[in-house]
Image (cartoon, rainbow, N blue to C red):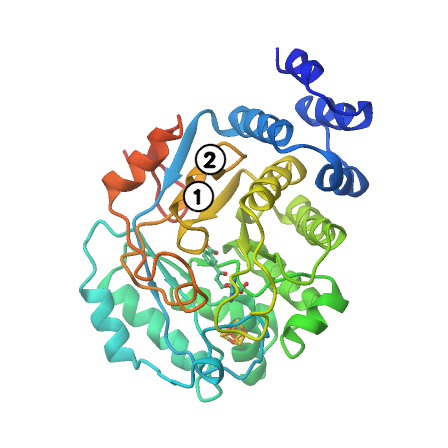
Amino acid sequence: MTKNIINLLNITSTIKEIGVKSLEGKRISVEEAVLLFEEANLSFLGMLADAICRAKNGTRVCYIRNSHIEPTNICIHHCRFCSYSARQTGNAWESDHDEMLKQVSSLELNIRELHITGGVHPGRDLNYYGELLKKIKEIRPDIHVKAFSAIEIDYMIKKAGLSYIEGLTFLKGCGLDAIPGGGAEIFDEEIRKQICDDKTSSSNWLLIHEIAHNIGLSSNATMLYGHLETYEHRVDHMNRLRALQDKTGGFNAFIPLKFKNQNNEFSYLKETTIIEDLKNFAISRIFLDNFTHIKSYWPALGRNIAQLSLSFGVDDLDGTINDSTKIYSLAGAEDQNPSMNESEMCELITQAGKIPYERDGAYNEIS
Ligand code: V47
Ligand code: SF4
């Protein structure tokens, strides 16, 4: 049926062949993915991505009740796309354990996941964050703690003079459940040099996630797109993730992050169009055949693009948030105080023709 519809579309035979191949469950190559970016039209990509997503997840889209903690915006790094760090805002702040634990104590009991990430503070270390994890778990043993990007982890483990496996095992022992996908940016070494020169390398990012997976911590993967990178760089990025997922199976979700251009050194760059955003979601779904979940992070995208993305391969909508993150509002996101209640999330999903369900941090359905 879907293959017959493909025949009606005005596309070249090569693009049609790539489409048929992916619908048959066969893996597409790097070159084929680049060709999709360059030549395939949006409706064709949407149809393909939606069909592939339905084969994996049916018509269901998950959402989560979650909250963020951002411990500080003081950061040793100097990422040119960042609107959040104290260097950029001119306004440094840091929360201590008590302030962060107060936030945890005030969370409603149905909040399932805590996402902790922020600047790489030169005065904080592995023990500081290990203690924080332990205290959080004393207050809320049930909550899934997804904390510290590979960039933060790289810094605290090296500072402690430990190997990655020792440091990650320590953090797991303190209560860490999973690692968020931040800090991946774009793996291509030349582009990485131009956008976030002093950050840990792509190979270290991948190694930290690999070791995390090997010791039983799951993680996510992001890709920051829409700045200096080309289509080849995006596909190369996804290809490195696909290879690691083949090895470990430890990634829960892939999260494309649209570059937002306010209040940072790249403000002269235009943001990507909605067409580009949707193409990017669709090709992620088609290329990453070993990822179950493609996530839309609505505080970054805005509600409208997030809703549209549900027809372009996305099955995971993050999250209720409750106005607990500033990373994207400072970069110019339309929701300056991002928060969605459960009925708003369900309505957004239902209006897109999908069936909402609530999940926990480990992707178990909440009945
Ligand atoms: O690594 C920073 C990005 C990331 C900008 O794992 C920007 O569930 C766009 O990783 N424009 C941190 N993006 C956030 C992150 C994340 C978010 C939601 C869910 C998960 C998850 C992870 O934010 C950074 C960087 O790639 N970022 N500045 C900007 N101006
Ligand atoms: Fe620091 Fe993260 Fe901003 Fe880079 S993106 S400067 S690591 S806070």
Residue pictured at 60% horizontal, 28% vertical: 43
* Numbered label attached to residue 310: 2
* Numbered label attached to residue 306: 1
* Mark 1, secondary structure of its residue: helix
Circle 2 Cα neighbour tier, 10 Å, few/some/many (<14 / 14–19 / ≥20): many
From this viewpoint, is residue 184 visible? Answer: yes
**Identity of the amino acid at label 2?**
Leu
Residue pictured at 48% horizontal, 84% vertical: 87
From this viewpoint, is residue 315 visible? Answer: no
Tell whether circle 1 marks a residue whose Cβ is less than 8 angstroms from ligand 1.
Answer: no
Image: 264 above or below 91 = above
Q: In which quarter of the image is residue 290?
A: top right
**Identity of the amino acid at label 1?**
Ala
Residue pictured at 30% horizontal, 36% vertical: 346
Residue 9, image x, y percentages: 68, 19
* Mark 2, secondary structure of its residue: loop
Image: 88 above or below 321 = below
* Numbered label attached to residue 155: none
Image marks 2 and 1: residues in contact by CB distance under 8 Å: yes
In terms of depth relative to the viewer, which is nearer, 286 or 104?
286
Residue 302 appears left or right of 358: right
Image: 109 above or below 342 = below
